[in-house]
Amino acid sequence: MSFEGIDIQIERYTKKINAKTEQLKDPNLSHEERKRLETEVKNATLERNKWKIRKNNLFTTRHKK
């Protein structure tokens, strides 16, 4: 996958994380709903980090001597 494709994936997960984080600020959330949102944020963060690692690996592989 190209750098652009990886950047799109990273941006997609960042938007998802930001949206879920905004929802977590609601003081009227039930405990179950809060736990579900926190889990979604955690999973999206893990996926975003995987894409960042792939991007870094792709970059270092292309620029090895």
Image (spheres, rainbow, N blue to C red):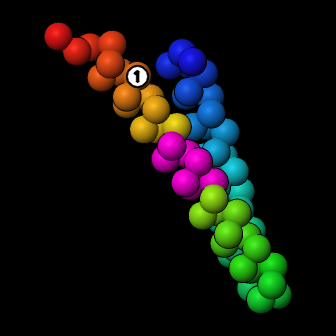
- The residue carrying mark 1 is 58
| Boundaries of the magenta span | 44-50
Mark 1 Cα shell of 10 Å, populated few (<14), some (14-19), many (≥20): some
Residue at (80%, 84%) from the top-left corner? 32
Residue 3 lies, with reference to residue 45, above or below; the image says above
Q: Is residue 11 visible?
A: yes
Q: Position of residue 60 (x, y in %)?
A: 30, 23
Quarter holding residue 56: top left
Question: Quarter of the image containing the N terminus?
Answer: top right
Is disc 1 placed on a helix, strand or loop? Answer: helix
Residue 11 lies, with reference to residue 60, above or below; the image says below
Residue 56 lies, with reference to residue 62, above or below; the image says below
Residue at (17%, 10%) from the top-left corner? 65
Residue 46 lies, with reference to residue 37, above or below; the image says above
Amino acid type assigned to the residue bearing label 1 in the image:
Leu
Residue at (54%, 15%) from the top-left corner? 2
Q: Is residue 21 left or right of residue 49?
A: right
Chief secondary structure of the magenta span?
Answer: helix
Q: Position of residue 5 (x, y in %)?
A: 60, 21
Q: Is residue 26 visible?
A: no
Membership of 48 in magenta stretch = yes
Q: Position of residue 16 (x, y in %)?
A: 69, 51
